[in-house]
Amino acid sequence: MAKSMTKSEIAAYIAEKVGVTKKQVNQFFEAQAELAYKQAKNQFVIPGIGKLVLVETAPREMVMRFGPKAGQTVKIPKKKRLKFRVAKAAKDAILGAKK
């Protein structure tokens, strides 16, 4: 399996493809990340790739299986989680369309 591209390799590829400098591409990455951090609670869409969403899980009960509390029911409070939902177009492009 081929190794993944580094940030500088990605910047060089995009810079060549679009016709801008690597510095401008890196500035774009930084601006996009900053905007994603601010907008994640409202969903942040990366067109053609997917979206970053904040999801709140419901409180639940769980039976402990191991340790000193084995067999006891423990309440787990609700919490917020950050998830990335991959777009259908990206799934189809990478995995191939379902028939």
Image: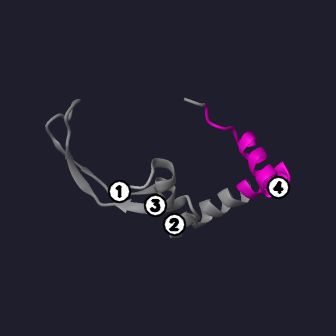
| Amino acid type of the residue tagged 2 in the rendering | Lys
- Of labels 3 and 2, earlier in sequence is 2
Nearer the observer: mark 2 or 4; the answer is 4
Q: Residue at x 50, y 60 (%)?
A: 89
Give percent across and percent down for residue 20.
Answer: 84, 56
| Side (left or right) of 33 relative to 65 | right
Residue 82's disc number = none
Badge 1 amino acid? Lys
Could you tell me the amino acid type at mark 3? Lys
Q: Is residue 95 visible?
A: yes
Query: Residue 88 shows which numbered tag?
Result: 3
Q: Nearer the viewer, mark 4 or mark 1?
A: 1
Badge 2 marks a residue whose secondary structure is helix
Q: Residues within 10 Å of mark 4 (few under 14, many from 20)?
A: few
Residue at 82 percent across and 55 percent down: it is 24
Which residue occupies 31% across, 55% down?
Answer: 77
Helix, strand or loop for disc 4: helix
**Which badge, 3 or 1, is on the more N-terminal residue?**
3
Query: Which labelled disc corresponds to residue 99?
Result: 1
